[in-house]
Amino acid sequence: MVTPENRRLVVSAAVSPRWGRTAPGWGPLPGYLHWRHFRSLDLAIALNLGEANAGELLTLAQQFNVGSFWYGRRDRAGAAYWDLVNYLGDRGATPRALERDQPPAAVGAVALKYIALAPDTAPALEVAYQGQRVLLVPPLKRQAADALPEVTGSLDALVIPAELATSENRNHIMARMKPRRVVVYGDPGRAGAAQSLWPVPRDFTREGAVSLYLDASGVTARQWRPQE
């Protein structure tokens, strides 16, 4: 996320690897940030922090100047997790807990709200700017729509994992959260989300990176597709 003041926030969330399986490698963040010619980040927020995303966050800490690291839920730890914690601890920048400390309520003109979900589940993050609201939902253990939070009014955009974007959940999500746009990440084919018809615009990140732009007139989306 880049604010109008050119302040930068990275949000991370990942599905924990099953026992006996190795954690995934780096995600797309370091390469994307280098492509944007960024050198510094104001915040890095891991909605869940564990072996699945620690390696990528360690790369961010090593290659960029990061103001502070925060996390919502601690997941299973492994070598990459301890490498991250030790690296940041040696520099006096140990990740801080959203629940115990006082996390930032805004980055520049963009407001941040952390929304608790089910017990032992990472929180969701609501981003708001000039009256527009986007809710980012992390991977959930329960793939039922009732795991989503109650929201006041409607959302200009809802970002959810593919496992939630199924035809069985669609009507419940529309009635409960009233999103004007849905962005689905993960594998929509395996989850059945690709066959779910929505009454609002819907984008799959598996088909190309989705960028959301917030201003007073609303939220617009642009998608970069590999074949373009």
Image (tube, grey):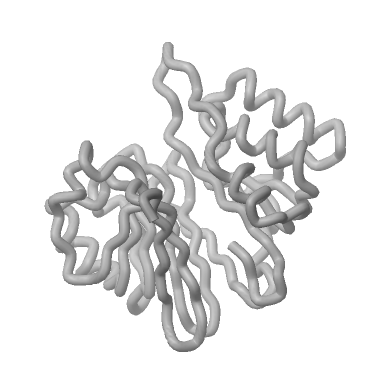
Which residue is pictured at 69% across the width and 73% down the height? 108
Which residue is pictured at 53% across the width and 37% down the height? 27
Whether residue 47 is situated above or below residue 57 in the rendered picture: below
- Let me know if residue 156 appears in the view: yes
Whether residue 133 is situated above or below residue 218 in the rendered picture: above
Which residue is pictured at 67% across the width and 68% down the height? 107
Name the residue at the front extreme.
228
The reply, left or right, for residue 48 in relation to residue 160 is right
Which residue is pictured at 49% across the width and 72% down the height? 213
- Let me know if residue 100 appears in the view: no
Name the residue nearer the viewer: 210 or 141: 210
Name the residue at the top extreme.
20
Name the residue at the right extreme.
91
The reply, left or right, for residue 28 in relation to residue 91 is left
The reply, left or right, for residue 20 in relation to residue 194 is right
Residue 202, picture quadrant: bottom left
Percent x, y of residue 15: 43, 35
Count of number-bearing discs: 0
Percent x, y of residue 118: 38, 47
Name the residue nearer the viewer: 75 or 63: 63
Task: Report the quarter where the C terminus lies.
Answer: bottom left
The reply, left or right, for residue 27 in relation to residue 152 is right
Task: Report the quarter where the N terminus lies.
Answer: bottom right
Whether residue 55 is situated above or below residue 143 in the rendered picture: above
Percent x, y of residue 67: 78, 53
Percent x, y of residue 82: 68, 24
